[in-house]
Amino acid sequence: MWLRAGEGSTSDMMGLFATTAMQGLSILGSLFLFVVGAVVALSIVLFFIDITQTKDAIRRNYPVIGRFRHIFSTLGEFFRQYFFAMDREEMPFNRAERDYINDIADDGHETVPFGSTKILSTGASIFANGMFPKLEGEHSPQKPCIIGPNARRPYEPNSFFNISAMSYGSLSKPAIQALSHGAQMGGCWLNTGEGGLSPYHLEGECDIVFQLGTAKFGARNDDATLNVEKLKKICENPQVRMIEIKLSQGAKPGKGGILPASKVTPEIAEIRGIPEGEDAISPNRHVDASDPKTLLDLIHQTREASGLPVGIKFVVGNIASVKRLLDRIEARGPDSAPDFITLDGGDGGTGAAPLPLMDNMGMTIRESLPMVTDLLEAYDLRDRITVIAGGKLITPAEIAWAFCAGADFVTSARGFMFAMGCIQALKCDKNTCPTGITTHDKRLQRGLDPTNKAVRVMQYVKTIRKEVEMIAHSCGVDHPRQMTRDHVLIVQASGHTITLSEVTKRKSA
C-alpha cells in the first residue's frame, strides 16, 4: 500500500511538472510570436516612412536596411577608440597620451616598461641630455618671474604650469569646482575663460586669471564695450591676479566664442550679463579694439582700472600683424606694452568650433612660439613681456619643448580635462558629455565628484612640474626656463636630427 501511494504521488508530480512546462512553452511561444509580429509591424511602418521621405537617399533607396548605415557609423567611433586604433593613432589626442594623464592623475604613477613606443616621424622632438647632469641637491633655485612689475599689483606665480581658459558654461559646475580646488592644492593659477567669474572659480581660493573675451562677459556694457565699474568690482577680489584680453583662441581663430542656448541657464546668464536661454555668441573681435592703437588703449584702460597685470591672448595668423603691434609699442614706449602674451595654437581647443576654422586657420604653437619670442628679442621687449604658451601642450616633453622655444609659462586646458576623467567622447557641444565635464544635465553631472577630481587635478599639475624639471636636469640645467633651443633636437625627413636653434635660423634666413 505504501509503495503504491508513493508511486501515485510521483506520477501526479510528474504530470503537474509536464503541464507547467507545456504552459511555459505556450507562453514563450506566444511571446515569441508577439515579438516577431511587433518587429514585422515596425519594419512595415519604417518601410513606408523611409520610402516616402526625401531627406536621406540611402533610406529612400534601401528602406529599413539603410538605417543600419547610420547605426554602424555612430558606433564606429566607439569601436575604433576601444578596439581598433593603435595607442598612438587617434586624433586629436591618442590613447597613449590619455592613459599617461589618467595614470599620473590617479596615483602619480609615471613609469612604463620595456621601451618607447613613440614614432620619431619628421618634426618630432627629442632632448639632448647632458653628459654630466647635476646631482640631486646641486640645483640652484629658480629665479622669480614677476608678471607686470610696473602694475599696482604685480603677480609672481608659484607654478610654471597652469590651467588655461575654460568657462563656466562650457564646463559644468562640478568641473569648475574641481579645477578651483585642484589649482589651490597644486599651487597653480586658474583662467576663468571668457564666460565671466563664477563663484565656483573662486570656491577653492586659488589664484585667478580673469579673461576678457570679445563680449567682455561679466564686465560688459550692452554694446560689448568695457564696463570699468564692473571690472573694478571683480578685481577687488584678492584672488584675481591678472587679466587676459582674448583676441582669438585655438578652437576658432577669427570667430567669437559660442555657447549654445541649452547651456545658458539663469545662473550663467546672470554671471555673464546676457539674456537667458539664447545662444551666447561673442563678436569676432573687441568692438573697442580695431587696430594696434585702440588695442593698446584698451590694455591701458584695463590696467588702470584694475591695477593688475594685463595681457593679450591670440593665435598668430600673419606675423606682419604682430610686427605692426610691436611697432606701435615701440612708438609709444615699453610701458604701453601688454604685460604678457598668451600664444595659442590654431589646431583646436576645448570649445566647439566650425570645422573649417579648427582645421585650417592659424599657426600651430610649434611655428608661432619661436617666431614671436624672436620678434620680442628683436624689438628689445623680451624682458618687458612675459610669454605664456598654450595649444595642445599636455605632456612633459611638449611643455619642456615650449620652454626651449622661449616660453616663460605654459598653460593647458584639455590636459586638465583628461585629468578630470574626459574620455574624448567628442560630445562637448551636445550637452551630453558622458563624464559630466561639459554638460549641464544634472544626471550626467552626478558622475563627477569634485572632491575626487580636485585631487586628480593636483596630481596632474604636480607630476607635470616634476617631470619637466627632470627633463631640464637631464639636459644639465637647473630649471626649465634655463633650457634653450640647443637642448631640443628636431627629427628631419632623413631621420637625422638638428637643434631647434638651427631650424629657426633656417626659417628666418
Image: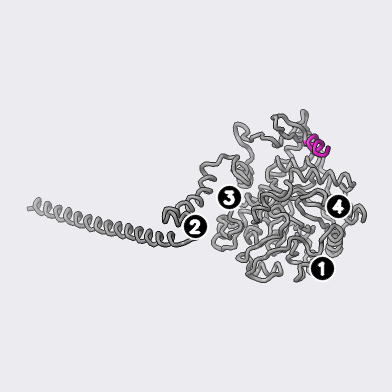
Give the mark, 2 or 3, whose residue is nearer the N terminus.
2
**Residue 291 visible in the snapshot:** yes
Mark in front: 4 vs 1: 4
Check disc 2 and report its element: helix, strand or loop.
loop
Q: Does residue 274 lie above or below 289 as drawn?
A: below
Give the mark, 4 or 1, whose residue is nearer the N terminus.
1
Question: Which residue is the site of mark 2?
Answer: 56
Question: Which residue is the site of mark 3?
Answer: 423
> What is the distance, in whole Å, between disc 1 and disc 2 at their CAs?
53 Å
Residue 399 placed where, x, y %?
72, 43
Check disc 3 and report its element: helix, strand or loop.
loop
Residue 64 placed where, x, y %?
41, 56
Q: Nearer the viewer, residue 51 or 490?
A: 51
Asked whether, in this view, residue 44 is left or right of residue 94, the answer is: left
Residue 345 placed where, x, y %?
72, 49
Q: Amino acid at mark 3?
A: Ile
Mark in front: 1 vs 2: 2
Q: Amino acid at mark 4?
A: Arg
Task: State yes or no: discs 4 and 1 in contact (Cβ < 8 Å).
Answer: no
Instruction: Count residues near mark 1 (Cα–Cα under 10 Å), then give few for <14, some for 14-19, many for 20+.
Output: some
> What is the distance, in whole Å, between disc 3 and disc 1 at their CAs?
40 Å
Name the quadrant containing residue 273.
bottom right
Q: Does residue 281 lie above or below 126 as drawn?
A: below
Give the mark, 1 or 2, whose residue is nearer the N terminus.
2
Residue 324, numbered label = 4
Question: Which residue is the site of mark 1?
Answer: 228
Asked whether, in this view, residue 23 is left or right of residue 432, the answer is: left
> What is the distance, in whole Å, between disc 2 and disc 3 at their CAs?
31 Å
